[in-house]
Image: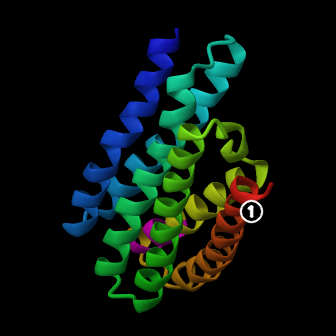
Amino acid sequence: MTNFINFITIARIFLAPIILIFLIFGNYLVCVLLFFVAGLTDYLDGYLARKYNAESQLGEILDPIADKILIVFILIGLSVDLDSFLIAFLGSLIIAREIGVSALRDYSSRNNKSHKTKVTYLAKIKTSVQLFSIGLYIFALAFSFNLLIVIGDIFLIIATFVTLYTGYEYTLNVFKK
């Protein structure tokens, strides 16, 4: 069962560039569908791992990586597609934080401090808000509903603040005595 659950997580990683390609070529309805499938894989892998007590170290590592890859690919595509400085700027901050936290996790594992960079509840909320804002943008493009772009901007701003704050929290946890 663990291998199947990890396969679901890996599928999300492979969906990211596919969604980006459809986004670039303006096939927004397919993007909505694939983004929904990607969100479903995010829910399913965690649910199945808990239900069948099949949580694994690999799954613990892959799940946040899959989320990051999905978010980064789509933010890049949206900033180009919508020609949005705001999405590009906030996306850059989010990407920089994700790289920084990945470096902290690497540092922590090399120094027997992995427990200090375990995914927190607030970080899970951060990912949810990021994905929600991205979903709003994709939905707005698919159905020409421009008000959702403004709402997506608001949620992306909120997501960026939470993203930077959780990065700050991880940094404090790793380096406090």
Asked if the magenta segment contains residue 24, the reply would be no
Mark 1 Cα shell of 10 Å, populated few (<14), some (14-19), many (≥20): few
Q: Quarter-wise, where is residue 84 in the image?
A: bottom left
Give the magenta part as a residue range: 136-141
The answer to whether residue 139 is magenta is yes
Q: Circle 1 sits in a helix, a strand or a loop, which is it?
A: helix
Res 116 quadrant in image: top right
> Which of 126 and 146 lies nearest the eye of the viewer?
126
In this picture, is 40 found above or below 142?
above
Where 34 sits versus 147, above or below? above
> Residue at coordinates 28% horizontally, 59% vertically from top-left?
20
Q: Name the quadrant containing residue 31.
A: bottom left
What residue do we see at 57% from left, 82% from top? 153
Question: Is residue 147 placed above or below 29 in the rendered structure?
Answer: below
Q: Residue furthest bottom?
A: 85
- Its colouring scheme is rainbow
Residue 135 in the figure: left or right of residue 79: right
Residue 79 in the image: above or below residue 11? below
Is residue 41 something that shows in the picture? Answer: no
Q: Position of residue 50 (x, y in %)?
A: 70, 20
Q: Main secondary structure of the magenta part?
A: helix
> Most extreme residue toward the left, as rendered?
25
Residue 91 screen position, x and y as percent? 46, 75
Task: Tell me the kind of residue under disc 1.
Answer: Leu
Q: Is residue 157 left or right of residue 122?
A: left
Camera-side residue of 65 and 84: 65
Residue 132 pos. (x, y %): 60, 62
Instruction: Provide the residue designation for mark 1.
Output: 172
Q: Estimate the x, y position of residue 124 in percent, counting from the top left.
A: 69, 50
Closer-to-camera residue (100/131):
100
